[in-house]
C-alpha cells in the first residue's frame, strides 16, 4: 500500500494506492478551520482497508506553493517514512497540477503566488516565479493551461483566457496525484531524510526590486 | 530521550546560530528549511545516544508553540506522523512552560508553588507556577525581550550574533559601573528594554572613538542594567507574595552575570534553581520534562493537533 500527499495548493488531496490501483482518496479545499491533515490521513488509510503498518512507500508534493501546506505535507511524509523505514519520494507540484487536465496533461501550469505573481511551469522546464505582468510574454503561443485557482487566467492575461483548461475538463486533484505518484514511484529515486526540502522558487526580479527599494 | 524521574537519557541540540549569523538575526525561511532536513537525523542521534530503539519508546512529546510557525509546523507534523505510524501517544507542550519545568532536570524534587523568570530572545516573562499546576503570567515585556536587548546591544557595539554570549564574554573584562544606564521603567511587574538600548546607542554615538576597554565597559554596564532590571522585578514579585522556590530559565539565563547576581540577590529569600546552561538554551530535554509533568495532569493529546505559534504557558 502506497500513499501520496499534495497539500501544496488551495485544492489538497490524499491518495492510497495498491500497486498502481486507487484504493481510497480524499479531496478537499484548504480552510483554516479544517482539522489537522493527519486526521484525514488516518481516515483515508482506514478507508483503504489498511493501517500505518501496511504502507510501503510515500510521496509528497514539494511545491512551489503554500508555505504552510508544504511544511505540513513534507513533514508528515518524512515522519511516516522514517517511522516505518519506507522509501520517501517528492514530486513537483506544478506538473501534478498540469495532470488535472483530462486527457493529455496541460502543457503549462500556473499557480497564484500572491502579490500579483504566479508560479509558472512549462513542459520540460523548471518552475519559476513570474510577475503577472510578464505572463503574456512568457506563455507559449499554443498552450493548454491549467490554472489554480480555476478561472484566474482571465484576470491575469484577459486576451488569453481561452487557453485555460475549462471547468468541464478539470479532474479532481486526487486523479492527477494518482498519476503523478505512479510516475514518481516508477521513475524517480527516493530521498534521504536530510534531502527533504520544499521547492523554493526565487522571487521574480520585480519582487526583488520592490524589496530593495527604500 | 527522557525517562520518568525525570531522568535524562540523551539531549541532542542542533543549533542554527551559524546559519543565521551572517544576517544578524534569525531568518524564518532559513529556519524552517533547515528544520525539515535536520530533524530526522537529530532524532536518530538522540535514540543512539540513549542506546534506545523505537520499540522501547512509550510516547512522543513535541513543542506545540509558541515560536516561528514554519519550524513548529515541521516539528508538530513530523512528531505526530511518527507517533501515528508507530501507534504511540503524543503530547504537545508549551515551549515556554518547558523553560520553567526544565528546573526539574536540575533538581527533580522542584514542585510548585514556584516564582519563575523566563528570559530569551523572544520572551521576558515573570510567572507563577501554582500549586494546582497552572502557570500564570504576572509580568511581561512591553517592548523588546531581554535576549533581543542583548542582540541589539551587541549590534550597536559591533559584536556578532547571537549577542548574549558575545556581551557576556566582553563584559567580563569591563567595569559594570563605568556608565550608569537608565533602569527600564514599566508599570507593575512588566519589563521594558527599548530605553536602555537607545541609551547605549547615544552613548556610542557621542564618542568619537571607542577603545577596546571602552567597549568592554559599555558591554558590562549595559549587561548590568538589563540584569538589574530583571532581578528587580523578581524581587518585587517575591516581596509581594513569597514563593519557596524561584526558577530561572530561557537562553538569557545562561548569562553569567545574571546567574551570579540572582544567587546573591534571590538566594536569601527562596530556594533558587537555575538549570545548567545547556538546559536553559532551547533544548528537547525540557520538552520531555514538560511532557512528564503535563502527562500526569492531563494525559496525552486525544486527537491530532495543529501548531500554535502564539501559545502561552498552557
Ligand atoms: Zn526558548
Image (cartoon, coloured by chain):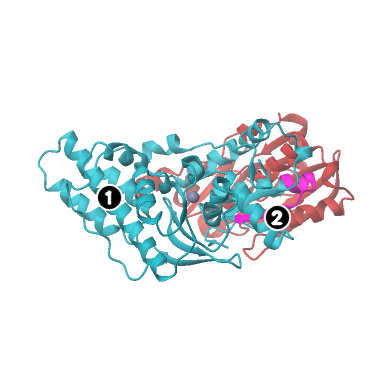
Q: Which residue does the image show at 85% across and 39% down from the upper left? A: A20
Query: Mark 2 — on which chain does it sit?
Result: A
The residue furthest front is: B268
- According to the picture, the residue beneath numbered tag 1 turns out to be B224
Q: Is residue B264 shown left or right of residue B210?
A: right
User: Which label was assigned to residue B85?
Assistant: none
Colour of chain A in the rendered structure image: red
Q: Is residue A186 visible?
A: yes
Quadrant in the picture for residue B13: top right
Q: Is residue B52 above or below residue B237?
A: above
List x then y, in percent, for residue B95: 55, 53
The residue furthest right is: A49
Residue neighbourhood size for the residue with mark 1, other residues' Cα within 10 Å, grouped as few (<14), some (14–19), many (≥20): many
Q: CA distance from mark 2 to mark 1?
A: 48 Å
Quadrant holding the N terminus of chain B: top right
- According to the picture, the residue beneath numbered tag 2 turns out to be A37
Residue neighbourhood size for the residue with mark 2, other residues' Cα within 10 Å, grouped as few (<14), some (14–19), many (≥20): many
Q: Is residue B26 shown left or right of residue A113?
A: left
Q: Which chain is cyan?
A: B
Amino acid at each position: 500500500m502506497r500513499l501520496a500527499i499534495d497539500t501544496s495548493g488551495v485544492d489538497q488531496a490524499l491518495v492510497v494506492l495498491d500497486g498502481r490501483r486507487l484504493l481510497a482518496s480524499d479531496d478537499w479545499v484548504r480552510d483554516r478551520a479544517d482539522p489537522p491533515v493527519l486526521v484525514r490521513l488516518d481516515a483515508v488509510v482506514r478507508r483503504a482497508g489498511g493501517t500505518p503498518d501496511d504502507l510501503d512507500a510515500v510521496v509528497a508534493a514539494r511545491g512551489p506553493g503554500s508555505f504552510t501546506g508544504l511544511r505540513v505535507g513534507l513533514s508528515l511524509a518524512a515522519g511516516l517514512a522514517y517511522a516505518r523505514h519506507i522509501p520517501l519520494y517528492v514530486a513537483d507540484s506544478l506538473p501534478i497540477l498540469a495532470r488535472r487536465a483530462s486527457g493529455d496533461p496541460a502543457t503549462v501550469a500556473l499557480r497564484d503566488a500572491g502579490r500579483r505573481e504566479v508560479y509558472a511551469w512549462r513542459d520540460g522546464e523548471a518552475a519559476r516565479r513570474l510577475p503577472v505582468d510578464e505572463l503574456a510574454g512568457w506563455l507559449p503561443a499554443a498552450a493548454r493551461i491549467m490554472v489554480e485557482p480555476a478561472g484566474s487566467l482571465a484576470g491575469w492575461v484577459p486576451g488569453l483566457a481561452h487557453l485555460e483548461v475549462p471547468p468541464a475538463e478539470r479532474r479532481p486533484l486526487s486523479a492527477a496525484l494518482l498519476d503523478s505518484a505512479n510516475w514518481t514511484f516508477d521513475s524517480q529515486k527516493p530521498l534521504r531524510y536530510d534531502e527533504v526540502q520544499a521547492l523554493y522558487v526565487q522571487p521574480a526580479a520585480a519582487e526583488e526590486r520592490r524589496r530593495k527599494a527604500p | 530521550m527522557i525517562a520518568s524521574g525525570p531522568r535524562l537519557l540523551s539531549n541532542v541540540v542542533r543549533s542554527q546560530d551559524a546559519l543565521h549569523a551572517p544576517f544578524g538575526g534569525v531568518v524564518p525561511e532559513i529556519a524552517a528549511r533547515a528544520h525539515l532536513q535536520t530533524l530526522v537525523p537529530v532524532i536518530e542521534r538522540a535514540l543512539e545516544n540513549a542506546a534506545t530503539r523505537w520499540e522501547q519508546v512509550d510516547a512522543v512529546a513535541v513543542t506545540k508553540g509558541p515560536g516561528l510557525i514554519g519550524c513548529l509546523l515541521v516539528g508538530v507534523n513530523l512528531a505526530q506522523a511518527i507517533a501515528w505510524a508507530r501507534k504511540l501517544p503524543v503530547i504537545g507542550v508549551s515551549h515556554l512552560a518547558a523553560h520553567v519545568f526544565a528546573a526539574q532536570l536540575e533538581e527533580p524534587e522542584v514542585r510548585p508553588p514556584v516564582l519563575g523568570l523566563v528570559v530569551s530572545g523572544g520572551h521576558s516573562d515573570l510567572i507563577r507556577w501554582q500549586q494546582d499546576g497552572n502557570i500564570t503570567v504576572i509580568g511581561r515585556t512591553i517592548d523588546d525581550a531581554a535576549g533581543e536587548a542583548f542582540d541589539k546591544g551587541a549590534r550597536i557595539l559591533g559584536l556578532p550574533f547571537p549577542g548574549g554570549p558575545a556581551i557576556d564574554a566582553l563584559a567580563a573584562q569591563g567595569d559594570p559601573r563605568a556608565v550608569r544606564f537608565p533602569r527600564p521603567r514599566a508599570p507593575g511587574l512588566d519589563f521594558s528594554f527599548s530605553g536602555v538600548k537607545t541609551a547605549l546607542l547615544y552613548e556610542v554615538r557621542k564618542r568619537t572613538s571607542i577603545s577596546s576597554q571602552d567597549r568592554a565597559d559599555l558591554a558590562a554596564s549595559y549587561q548590568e542594567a538589563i540584569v538589574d532590571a530583571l532581578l528587580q522585578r523578581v524581587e518585587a514579585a517575591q516581596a509581594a507574595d513569597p514563593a519557596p522556590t524561584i526558577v530561572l530559565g530561557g537562553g538569557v539565563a545562561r548569562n553569567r552575570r545574571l546567574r551570579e547576581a540572582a544567587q546573591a540577590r534571590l538566594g536569601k529569600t527562596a530556594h533558587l534553581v537555575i538549570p545548567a546552561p545547556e538546559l536553559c538554551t532551547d533544548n528537547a530535554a525540557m520538552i520531555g520534562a514538560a511532557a512528564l509533568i503535563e502527562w500526569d495532569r492531563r494525559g496525552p493529546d486525544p486527537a491530532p493537533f495543529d501548531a500554535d505559534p502564539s501559545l502561552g504557558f498552557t
